[in-house]
Amino acid sequence: MLVTGLFMLVELVGGILSGSLALLADAGHMLSDFAALLLAFVAFRISHKPADAKRSYGYDRFQILAAFINGLALIVIAIWICVAAVQRFYEPVQVLATPMLIVAIIGLLVNIIVYRILTTEQTDNLNVRAAALHVIGDLLGSVAAIAAAVIILLTGWMPADPLLSIIVALLVLKAGVSVTRRAGHILLEGTPDNLPQDTILDTLKNIEGVQDVHHLHVWALTAERRLATVHLVTEAEYVDQVRISAVRILNEQFSIAHPTVQVEIKPCIS
């Protein structure tokens, strides 16, 4: 977070002095990176707070809310870059390619370091992935700025700056939409993509003694923390066996750490 924030200031000054939209766009994106990393840090700290009377599941979902905000920020930044780039096509600006190239190369190195820090350990945490996507967008922005600077140095063709900015913006937009869609799916308590309810339903129906399965709901607090509730109908002699088997299957086969299994021997009243 600190590395990104400090270099964002360097890139902002470099973009203003050189007149490069690619650098200014990358500086704006790095500002969002700084905010994304700050939000991720705060989210981790808050998510570790214990559950209380008002939030019985704790504060884990704050991470998903942070990821959703980060995704929206990526979309807004991408749109801003595209608008600014189109304006540059109609009103060309003289770009100082040499300082632009120097700052862009330093930016590339900084983004590689930050990305390595974020991806040292493999994780499904959506908040970390959102922050890493921000950094990938910055990394691509630095590559685009380097390419634009080289083209301008060799040919003097100024439209290279806004053109490459648009290409990066489209990649950033795609990443932003992806993170926002996935975070929104979790916030709406949608079924995790790799946990089809039909498969779970069929597996539970095959438990010895189970006569019927209904009211199956599968959702996630975070990308890593899955939950499920289900009603199973059986005869009195199979109650304990069915409950133990169902919990074990949901734990081991479907990685659902918090299943709630209701076993019924009479018609369901809910």
Image (tube, rainbow, N blue to C red):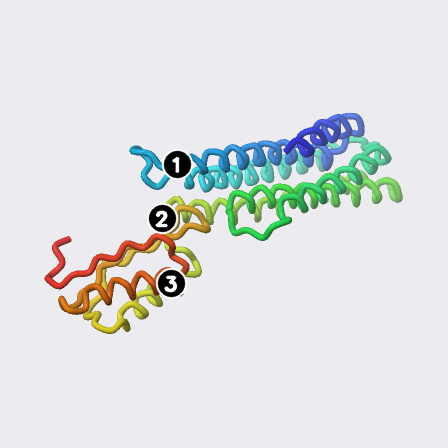
Q: Residues within 10 Å of mark 2 (few under 14, many from 20)?
A: some
> Which label sits in the foreground, 1 or 2?
1
Q: Secondary structure at mark 2?
A: loop
In what quadrant of the picture does the N terminus appear?
top right
Q: Quadrant of residue 138?
A: top right
Of the numbered discs 1 and 3, the one sitting upstream in the chain is 1
Q: Are marks 1 and 2 in contact (CB under 8 Å)?
A: no
- Which residue carries the number 2 mark? 189
- At horizontal 68% and vertical 37% (from top left) the residue drawn is 85
- Which residue carries the number 1 mark? 50
Q: Is residue 199 above or below residue 186?
A: below
In-front residue for pair 238/4:
238
- Which residue carries the number 3 mark? 196
Label number found at residue 5: none
Q: Residues within 10 Å of mark 3 (few under 14, many from 20)?
A: few
As shown in the figure, which amino acid type bears the numbered disc 2?
Glu
